[in-house]
Image: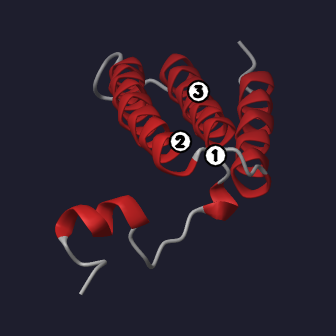
Amino acid sequence: MRPVIPYVTAALLFGLGVYGVLRRRNAVLVLMAVELMLNAVNLILVTADTTVRAALPHSGQVFALFVIVLAAAEIGVGLAIVLQLYRLRASVTVDDVPLTEAPAGVAADRGEGAK
């Protein structure tokens, strides 16, 4: 098998994922772009496992399974964060998220807002 085609395909998928992470403003689309990058890594791992005979048999496929498990956990946590962001801000736009201050509802619950 010629490994050039899967490697080029994985590079294109990874590049498309990087473009999606850097360019998109919607948090759900950013998560989808990260999943696209992880799938490109899976393609590289499986292709390298089939073309390069390593000391450990099927090691690329095992690493690909670990990446799939990591992707599932990332989606679970990421979607929970996006849903909480939507509940607090009524928007999932990444540019509108202030990273330095707490939302008004959280500050009021802690007693920090009114002094």
Residue depicted at 74% across the width and 51% down the height: 25
Crowd band around label 2 with a 10 angstrom C-alpha radius: few (<14), some (14–19), many (20+): few
Nearest to N terminus: mark 3 or mark 2: 3
* Residue to which mark 3 is pinned: 39
Residue depicted at 75% across the width and 19% down the height: 2
Q: Quarter-wise, where is residue 32 in the image?
A: top right
Q: Give yes or no for contact between labels 1 and 2 (Cβ–Cβ under 8 Å).
A: yes
Nearest to N terminus: mark 3 or mark 1: 3
Give the SS element for disc 3: helix
* Residue to which mark 1 is pinned: 91
Residue depicted at 71% across the width and 50% down the height: 18
Task: Decide if residue 59 is on the left or right side of residue 5.
Answer: left
- From the viewer's perspective, is the residue at label 3 or at label 1 nearer? 1
61 in relation to 109, above or below: above
Q: Amino acid at mark 1?
A: Ser
Give the SS element for disc 2: helix
